[in-house]
């Protein structure tokens, strides 16, 4: 049977949790974008109906929202995960090397 080891299951669960949280964060970002857009539209129509300006800040925010989409759903998320995993491995190797140079035996915790 090709079951995942406990460590592999932990890594898979952590990655799945991060991806779900990122998607929830994106949904919140879209919700805030729409709410603020509606608020700016109402404010614009109440204060200066002869000059529509609300779409300018919304346009720039939309560009930021597009960048969020690219990072979340594009190759950016996988690249960030790969970089993070490599950094974790480097840091663990550095800590293990430092631990070994401190004169500690491999079987002791301190």
Image: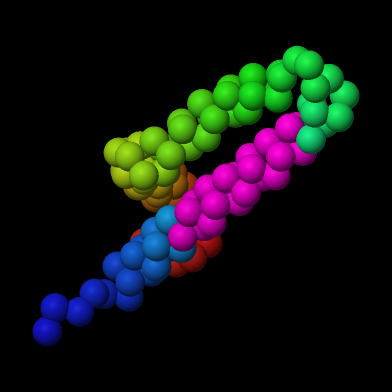
Tell me where residue 22 appears, x and y as whole percent.
49, 52
Residue in front for this viewpoint, 69 or 78: 69
- Magenta stretch? 20-41
* Relative image position of residue 78 (x, y in whole percent): 32, 44
> Would residue 7 be visible to someone looking at this image?
no
Q: Residue at 79% of width from left, 26% of height from top?
A: 44
Q: Is residue 21 magenta?
A: yes
- Percent x, y for residue 95? 44, 47
Rendered-image quadrant of the N terminus: bottom left
Quarter of the image where one finds residue 34: top right
Establish if 53 lies above or below 33.
above
Residue furthest out toward the top:
51
Looking at the image, residue 37 lies above or below residue 107: above
Q: Nearer the viewer, residue 52 or 82?
A: 52
Give the total of numbered labels: 0
Q: Where residue 6 sits in the image (x, y, percent)?
A: 32, 75
- Judged by its main secondary structure, the magenta piece is helix
Residue 27 vs 3, above or below: the answer is above
């Amino acid at each position: 049977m090709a079951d995942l080891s406990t460590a592999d299951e932990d890594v898979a669960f952590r990655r799945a949790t991060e991806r779900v949280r990122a998607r929830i964060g994106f949904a919140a970002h879209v919700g805030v974008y729409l709410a603020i857009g509606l608020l700016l539209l109402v404010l614009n129509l109440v204060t200066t109906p002869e000059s529509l300006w609300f779409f300018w800040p919304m346009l720039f925010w939309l560009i930021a929202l597009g960048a969020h989409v690219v990072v979340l759903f594009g190759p950016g998320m996988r690249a960030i995960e790969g970089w993070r995993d490599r950094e974790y491995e480097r840091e663990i190797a550095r800590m293990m090397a430092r631990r070994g140079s401190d004169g500690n035996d491999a079987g002791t915790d301190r």
